[in-house]
Image (cartoon, rainbow, N blue to C red):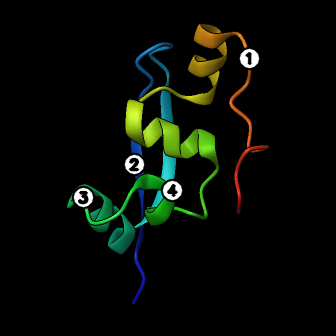
Amino acid sequence: MITNFAICRPCVITGKPYTVFVRSEDWNDWQDRKKLAQEAFPYLSSADREFLISSISPEGWDQVFLEPLDDASDES
């Protein structure tokens, strides 16, 4: 059975809560360093994967880097 759960924490830039939904098996593989984020979570946008890695939400990314983190470079 595939179990999905929410990863909810504040963005380190904005302080606002942000939530990403992942499959528990994928989360465990990533946490155990069996897979890179893009391998473990191909169903997430690059912005959501970045949040899991750095705790910077899409809104925070836009504030810091002044350009959106888009999915144009994703090979999905």
Q: Residue 51: image x %, image y %?
A: 48, 36
C-alpha span from label 3 to label 4: 12 Å
CA neighbours of label 4 inside 10 A, class few (<14), some (14 to 19), many (20+): some
C-alpha span from label 4 to label 1: 21 Å
CA neighbours of label 3 inside 10 A, class few (<14), some (14 to 19), many (20+): few
Q: What type is the residue that disc 3 sits on?
A: Arg
* Residue 33 marker: 3
Question: Which residue is pictured at 34% across the width and 74% down the height?
Answer: 25
Query: Quick one: quadrant of the N terminus?
Result: bottom left
For the residue pair 13 and 41, the one nearer the viewer reads as 41
Secondary structure of the residue carrying numbered label 3:
loop
In the image, is 10 to the left or to the right of 67? left
Is 18 above or below relative to 72?
A: above
**Rendering quarter of residue 10:** top left
Mark 1 and mark 3 lie on one chain; the one further toward the N terminus is 3
Q: What type is the residue that disc 2 sits on?
A: Ile
For the residue pair 64 and 57, the one nearer the viewer reads as 64
Please give the residue where the numbered disc 4 appears in the rendered image.
Answer: 38
Mark 4 and mark 1 lie on one chain; the one further toward the N terminus is 4
Q: How many marks?
A: 4
Question: Which residue is pictured at 40% across the width and 30% down the height?
Answer: 54
Mark 3 and mark 4 lie on one chain; the one further toward the N terminus is 3
